[in-house]
Image (tube, rainbow, N blue to C red):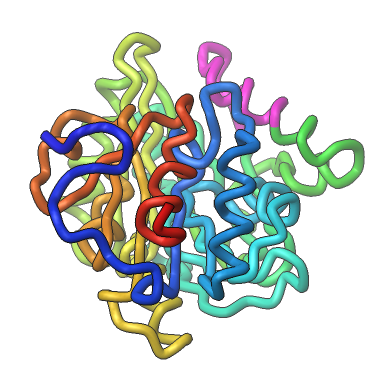
Amino acid sequence: MAGKGASGKTGAKQQSMIKLLALDLDGTTLNSNGEIPYANRAAIRAAEERGVLVTIATGRRFRDARPIALDLALNAPLICHNGALIKYADSQETVACDLLSTETSYEIVRVGKQFGGDALVSTDPHQNGTLLYDRISDDNIPLKKYLRWSETLHGGEAGREGVMHVPSLEDILHKQEIVHISFSGNCAPMIELEETLREELGDNVTLLATIYPTLDFTLLDILPPEASKGHGVAKLAELHGLTHESVMTMGDNFNDLEMLEYAGTAVVMGNADAKLLDREDFYSTLSNNENGVAAAIERFILNV
């Protein structure tokens, strides 16, 4: 296993080789309180001053990631929805967007409801983004908490515009541009839903399950077929004429795996799963509560 303090495989990249830095958000750039430590802020700013493009690559939707990007004044567009949407935080200009087809979206919602899951449909990708839902189960406490958090984050009318209740999703899907559908609920039915969608839709979708066993809660994200953080980072690098050797990525979870495998310099957080930390082709750094992002930037970009 690679050691602490941005250590690991030998032969660290020189600062001049890294031109694009893609950072996961939760569990990586943010500490466990959901805050950006000062050391991470300072290191990100220093990397940008060295001419490095810095982006966030997150599973969050654009509306939820945008405030953080604006706070950090990042100089590159955001990679959101696990790579399905690339978009500038300031101008909201869309760089690239993958969509689920209407037919596929209907099938996802139809099958998902058969398993008792609660659906969130992410629409309006070329603006600020809107979440649509038509029901929330009484026992889906994590989803209720997320919706309250989202409204608080955006505040007032903006929060209500960001999450909208509709009488029936099936009645409006044909009017929407859909970038992402998620289902959530108890673990057993959501895992069975994942297996069923994989059998029925195959290569027409990308499926990502995040399981919280202690809560008996699973979030199943259903995305366009080529969506992944790795695909998003590669697309952004290509737009800037960069090769993977000049890209550095940092993450802590398995939805970061493809972008870690793509990058010339891949750094895993100290709080990541042991299976990621055991990879000999990845470096490791300190945890998200120990300014691990700053430590890695200082080593691989700033040469401190």
Tell me the quarter of the image containing the N terminus.
top left
Instruction: Residue at 25%, 48% (x, y): give it.
Output: 197
> Horizontal placement of 16 versus 205: left or right?
right
Instruction: Residue at 55%, 35% (x, y): give it.
Output: 30
Q: Whole-percent x and y of residue 150?
A: 70, 35
Q: Is residue 130 visible?
A: no
Q: Whole-percent x and y of residue 39?
A: 58, 39
Q: Whole-percent x and y of residue 94?
A: 63, 76
Viewer-nearest residue: 129 or 115 = 129
Viewer-nearest residue: 185 or 301 = 301
Instruction: Residue at 52%, 78% (x, y): give it.
Output: 96
Instruction: Residue at 42%, 61% (x, y): give it.
Output: 301
Q: Is residue 280 magenta?
A: no
Q: Which residues are magenta?
A: 134-149
> Horizontal placement of 149 versus 46: left or right?
right
Place residue 34 in its image quadrant: top right
214 lies above or below 191: above
